[in-house]
Image: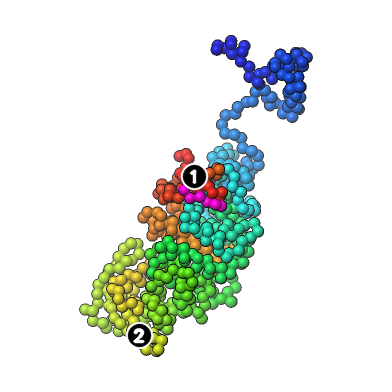
Amino acid sequence: MNAHQYFSQSESPARRRYDALRDFYFHGHPAIEVANRYGYKLSSFYSLARDFRNHLKSNIGDSFFFKQDLSGRKPIEKTSQINDLIIRLRKQNYSTEDIVTMANSKDFTISYGYVYQLLSKEGFTRLPRRSKDFKANQAIDKIEAPIARSLTIENESFSTQSAGLLCFLPIIRKYGIDTLISNSTYPSTRIIGRLSSILSFLALKLTGVRRYSVDDLWCMDRGSGLFAGLNVLPKNAWFSSYSHRVSRDMNVSFLKSMHTLWAEHNLLGDTSNLDFTTIPYWGDGAHLENNWSGKRNKALSSMLAVLAQDPDTGIIDYGNTDVTHKNESNVVLEYLDFYRADGQKQNLKYLVFDSRFTNYENLSKLDDQGIKFLTIRRRGKNIVEAIKAVDKTKWKTIRVEASGMKKRTIKVYDDTLILRGYKTPSGTAKKLRQVAITGHGKVKPALIITNDFDIKTETVVRKYARRWLVEKQISEQIEFFHLNKVSSAMVIKVDFDLTMTILAHNLYRIFAKELERYSSMSDHRIYEKFIANNGRVTIDNHKIKIEMKKKRELPLLLQSLTQFTELKYEQYGNRTIKFDGPASS
């Protein structure tokens, strides 16, 4: 076909409409003649003429016949509203990521590139480096967060600052933690179910959110909401009101079910390290006792909490904030009752704790129940002098673990002794084993006492040396999860807060176990290297795709998540989740 044939034979519908209406209106030909000439029914041609007249009345300037194709991206709806919002937020020193998060929460779909180009066009320069405190209090008039509701899964795409948080979803699904939460006794609300409620608390814990700000960006991030099965996380007041419906019995029941779960997955060994931690209270503490805070090096009005941790996996198995000076010596027996509750897997052989954790009478009760223990003996002046008087030839040199994957050479002296209060049920005194340690960096010798006479001296020291490392780990975890920062606007019942902290910490330990060579890294470091990442979420009929921003450790993270690609998630309509790197460099 040549050009002459094309124009003489080929005729598009748009061209046919144009010629027909031109003959009718411009040349004044009768309607029946025009309809026959161009192959229209008369009624159809009248309808065409009517539509053309209506178009001229309502859309002057737009072509009725030939639609003009625009190059580039499709224009964004409500452009003026979006532009005004972007400019207003930047004037309050919000970053591009913050602006996109807020816009997504308002159902405006925009990209980082669009925000960057608009701000550059309007003459805005890059923001200076801002502290976390400044970010939390920078807004003059904060954007009101949407109301949280159950998520309606639809095909959509949005940006999120919590793409890394979603990496915990496969672990929660694989280990059945979602089922554990759904079957718990925790309350639900009319709008937000039990699973979404607990995952909302967990989202804040896993991302280390400092809870002193009200309705901050975590209330608007779509990714955090997706993690909890909601459009966005609930507001500040909801968290406070929910926690006050939680009782200690609910927490104990949940801790027991978690204990069973960890045991089934072989995450609990035969040893538990027990330790007290102080949770300061900054309000009117007249109703509280003073407890020593090593972090602040003074006694404070505070709550005393106990934690039990497995030394091999780092899993925290038990927690309780209802500890007073009157009952603190009996906490070790309460933990034993918890561990041996009906249905619990019986594997506990060793308890390791410091010198002030319990008294000698309770040590006798542990021995009577077949539990081995390791603890430190308090060192009086006479005891220290007696140790110094021991013949030097009786001391033995060994090497034990120290912090930083190093080892230290120390000297030990193994002996037996009898202590007042450590007796059989009939009142007969029993012997204890004492291992004295020097060369460990302290002026006075350390004295380890135990009821295990069978293990080697090196094993005794190594077991307790690992507890020294555990004390450091517990301190790091509490700092990251902000357990000792209860002075926030979000008032959460402390025992429930501790239970959520335990769950979040354990998820980090399992997550680290999946990462080669990172299993001993603290929760905070894991968060900074792997979890703190932006990305884009795309939902279709079969899967949820999460594209995360480029990061040094991203290839290792994606490799560890490939084993979970076949998992399906009921809360997301039985879709699978696929994690991927950025679509463009």
For residue 363, what is the image quadrant?
bottom left
Relative to 352, 61 lies left or right? right
Relative to 426, 18 lies left or right? right
Disc 1 secondary structure class: strand
Which residue bears the numbered disc 2? 430
Question: Residue 483: x percent and y percent?
Answer: 51, 65
Say which amino acid is labelled 1.
Glu
Decide whether residue 570 is among the magenta residues.
Answer: yes
Say which amino acid is labelled 2.
Lys
| Residue pictured at 59% horizontal, 67% vertical | 246
| Residue pictured at 49% horizontal, 62% vertical | 503
Which dot, 2 or 1, sits closer to the camera?
Answer: 2
Disc 2 secondary structure class: strand
For residue 22, what is the image quadrant?
top right
The correct choice, above or below, for 475 with respect to 110 in the image is below
Quarter containing the C terminus = top left
Looking at this view, name the residue that lies furthest to the bottom: 427
Give the residues drawn in magenta, as a range: 566-571
At label 1, counting other C-alpha atoms closer than 10 Å, the crowd grade (few under 14, some 14-19, many 20 or more) is: many
Looking at this view, name the residue that lies furthest to the front: 343
Question: Residue 228: x percent and y percent?
Answer: 56, 54
Q: Is residue 320 visible?
A: yes
Q: Are marks 2 and 1 in contact (CB under 8 Å)?
A: no
Q: Is residue 444 visible?
A: no
Question: Residue 155: x percent and y percent?
Answer: 58, 43
Which residue bears the numbered disc 1? 547
